Amino acid sequence: MEKRLKPMDAEQLREYGHKMVDFIADYYKTIENFPVLSQVEPGYLRNLLPDSAPNQPDSFQHVLDDIQAKILPGVTHWQSPNYFAYYPSNSSVAGFLGEMLSAGLNIVGFSWITSPAATELEMIVLDWLAKMLKLPEDFLSAGQGGGVIQGTASEAVLVVLLAARDKALRRVGKGALEKLVVYASDQTHSALQKACQIAGIHPENCRLLKANSSTNYALSPELLSETISQDLAIGLIPFFLCATVGTTSSTAVDPLLALGKFAKDRSALVQALSTNPEFLKNKASQANMVVDYKDWQIPLGRRFRSLKLWMVLRLYGLENLQCYIRSHIKLAKHFEDLVAQDTRFEVVTPRIFSLVCFRLLPPSNGEYHGNKLNHELLDAVNSTGNVFISHTVLSGKYILRFAVGAPLTEEKHVNAAWKVLQDKATALLGESLR
Amino acid sequence: MEKRLKPMDAEQLREYGHKMVDFIADYYKTIENFPVLSQVEPGYLRNLLPDSAPNQPDSFQHVLDDIQAKILPGVTHWQSPNYFAYYPSNSSVAGFLGEMLSAGLNIVGFSWITSPAATELEMIVLDWLAKMLKLPEDFLSAGQGGGVIQGTASEAVLVVLLAARDKALRRVGKGALEKLVVYASDQTHSALQKACQIAGIHPENCRLLKANSSTNYALSPELLSETISQDLAIGLIPFFLCATVGTTSSTAVDPLLALGKFAKDRSALVQALSTNPEFLKNKASQANMVVDYKDWQIPLGRRFRSLKLWMVLRLYGLENLQCYIRSHIKLAKHFEDLVAQDTRFEVVTPRIFSLVCFRLLPPSNGEYHGNKLNHELLDAVNSTGNVFISHTVLSGKYILRFAVGAPLTEEKHVNAAWKVLQDKATALLGESLR
C-alpha cells in the first residue's frame, strides 16, 4: 500500500507534484487522440463512481487511473488544436506556471495587508496591460483609474453596472430603480442581461436595440439617440450604455467614438461594493494608504491572480503575443478563403478578427430549409469527434461559427476541419436531393 | 540565452512544470523563515518592477529569481504554521494537485456539453459532501436539490438572496422591492450586507438584530419573531433570514431549529440566474436532460472546480479529514487553557470550534483603556513577524482572535505564539505602569 498523504508536506508535494506535471504533459502530447467534443451520454459518470466519499484514503495512482479512464472521456478538449467552438480559452505554459504558483502560495488577497504583493502586482500589471492596449492615461492607477482582475467577464459587467446604478440612484433617489434604463445592441453578450436581472433593473427597461446586416451587426448611434429621446420624454432615466468590441455571435464592433466617451472612475465602484466590518480593519486600510481589492469586486476572497498575467507577459513578451494573435487571425483568413472558394457555402458577415461566420447555402430547389440543413451539418461535424464548432443565429439565419485560437492549432488542423465540413456537406446535400 | 517558450508545448510544460513544483516544495520547506505577516510598506513593489511590459521574453530563471527577491517579501504567509489570523485558508497536497489538474485541462464548464465530466463530477462530489454533513435527502441532486461550488462564500450568499428576492417579487409584484426585508444577527458576515447592496435591498430593510453575550452572540428567536411582527404590521414583506453556524467574529452558532426550517429548491435559483442566448444552445440542454451550472451562479465561465474537492476526499478519506479538524479543535482548546492560566488575560466567549476569543485585561488602576491596550498588543505581536493574529469587537470590547487551523501548525507553534503574546503583554503592562 502506498504511504499516506500528510495534509501538507513539502516532500510529498514535490513527489506527487512531479507525477501530476508528467500526467498533464502526457495529456497535451496525446490530446489529438481524444474526440474534441466529448461523446458521452448524460449521466454517464454516476454509474462509474461510488455513492459516497471513501472513509479511508485511496492511492494517488488509483486516482490518476480514474482520471484517465473515467474523467477524460467526459472532457471536451478546449485546448485541442481541433477546437473551433465558442471562443478559445487558451492555456499556455506560462499561464499554467502562474496558476501553479498561485495555488502553491494559496494566499487570500482581499485586503492589501493580507498579502501586499498580491494587490501591488495586480495594480502594476494592469497598468502594463492598459499601456499595451493604448488606453488613455485616466485608466492608470496613478490617478482615479486602476485595473482589477475580475473572476469572469460576467462579473466585470455586473460590477460596472452596479457602480452606475448606485451612482444614478444617489442622484435621483433610491426609489427610482424602476425608471433606470440600460442600452445595448441585441448582439451584446448575455452577461449584460444577467447583470440587469441581478441588479434589479426591470426587464422592460433593458433596451437591446436591433442590429442588422446594414451595420454589420453593430449598434446604430442614430437608433440609440432616438430611443434615448423617447425614453426621456416619458420620464425614464437612461443610465448605462454597453458597447462591444467583438460581439459574441459575429465579432461585430460597436462604433465607440460615435457612441460617446466613457470614463470610469473607481470611486463609484468602491461606493457600490464596499463593506468595512471590524474584523478586517487594519492600519494600512484605515489610513487610506492602500487599495483593498475586496471593494472592487463581488466576492471577499480572491486569489493571487496577477501572477498568471505577469508570468505570461514576462515569459512571452509583447512582440510574441502580438505575433501569436496575428497568426490566429491569419489562420481565420485562410479558412475564410477556403469557404469562399466553395460555391456551396457563403461567408455571412465580413471577418474582422479570428472568427468566421459562414453557412451551407440551401440547394436551389429551395425545398430544403437552410436552417435545418446547417443545424444538421453542425451535428454531423461535431459527432465525428474530429472537430468542434458552434453556431449562432443572425437575422433569423442559423450560422456556423469557426473561431480560431486554440494554442496548438496550425494550418493543417484548419484544413482538416474544412475537409470534414466539406465531406459532411456533400453527404447531407446528397441526402437532401434523394 | 534560454530557449524561447512556445505558447503550449508538452515538453516545455514538463520541464518548467517540474522546476515550479520544486520551487513550491522548497517554499513549504522554508516557510517558517519568512515573517508570517509581510512587513513591507505600501507601494514597495512599484519601485522594484519596470513601468511597462517587456517587448522581448525573459527567462524562467529570471522570473523565479524575481519571485524570490521581490514577490515573497510582500506575501503574508497564510500557510505558515504561525498563521492564526482571520480563519485559515488551507492548502493541502491533494488540493494543490487538484488545482494543477484543473489548470492543466483548462476547460470552461458553463454548460454540460462544454465538458460533461465537469458538471457530473461536481454533482456527485457535492452529493458526497451533503451525505458527509448528514444533510436531509432534499439536498441531494436526485430530487429538486443538488449542490454547486460557488467561487466564494460571498457569491453563495448573493445567489441565494437573489433567488429569494425574485421568488418574493414574482408573488408580490416587481415594484415591491423597497418593501422586502432581510433578517440576520449583527454577527453575520459582511457578505450578507454586500449581497443586499447588490440586490438592491434598501439598507434600512436589512435588519441586523443585536446579539450579545446573553446568547453567546447568537441570534435570539424571540427578538426575531418580535421584529418580524412589527415589520408585517407596517406593511413590509419579510423574505429572507440568514442564520450562521460559526460567526466570523466568535464562531457563534445561531439556533437553527428554533429559527425554523430552510428548504432550497433549485428552481428559484435557476429562474433568477438563467439566460439562454442562441450561441450556447445545444441538444442536451434543450432536451432538459442535463444541469447547466451557468444558471446556478453569477458568472458564465467556470473552472473544473470539483476536481479539487474530489481529490481531497479521495486522497485523504473521511476519517482522516475528521481527525484533522478535531486536531485543530484540540490545539485551540490547548491555547484556551494557556490563556485561562494567565490571570492577566481573559477568554471572552466560550470556545466552540477552533477559534479562541480573548483579551489582555486592563490593569486594575483602570487608567489604561483596555481597547487601546489590546490594539497595541496586536500590533506588537504582529510586527515581530513570528505570529499573525487578528481582532474583532464584541459589545464594544476590542478582542483578539486566535484561529487554529493552518496545515502545518503543531502544538509547538501554539506554545511559541503564546510566549510571544505573554512577552509583549509583559512589556506593554510594564510601560503602562511607568
Image: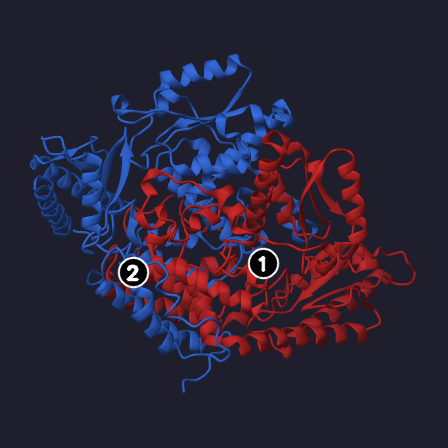
Chain colours: A blue, B red
- Badge 1 element: loop
- Percent across and percent down for residue B233 are 79, 36
Q: Looking at the rendering, in which quadrant would you find the N terminus of chain B? A: bottom left
Q: Which mark is residue B87?
A: none
Q: Is residue B174 left or right of residue B369?
A: left
Q: Residue furthest front?
A: A434
- Crowding around mark 2 (Cα neighbors within 10 Å: few <14, some 14 to 19, many 20+) is some
In the picture of the structure, the residue carrying the numbered disc 2 is: A40
Rendered view: B205 above or below B400: above
Of B170 and A185, the residue lying toward us: B170
Secondary structure category for the residue under label 2: loop
Side (left or right) of B121 relative to B172: left
Q: Position of residue B111 (x, y in %)?
A: 37, 50
Q: Chain of mark 1?
A: B
Q: Residue at x 31, y 34 (%)?
A: A246
- Which residue is denoted by mark 1 in the rendering? B39
Quadrant assignment for the C terminus of chain B:
bottom right
- Letter of the chain that mark 2 sits on in the rendering: A
- Amino acid at the residue labelled 1: Gln
Question: Is there one chain holding both mark 1 and mark 2?
Answer: no
Residue B366 shown left or right of residue B240 in the figure: right
Front residue of A395/B106: it is A395
Kindly indicate the quadrant of the structure image that contains residue B175: top right
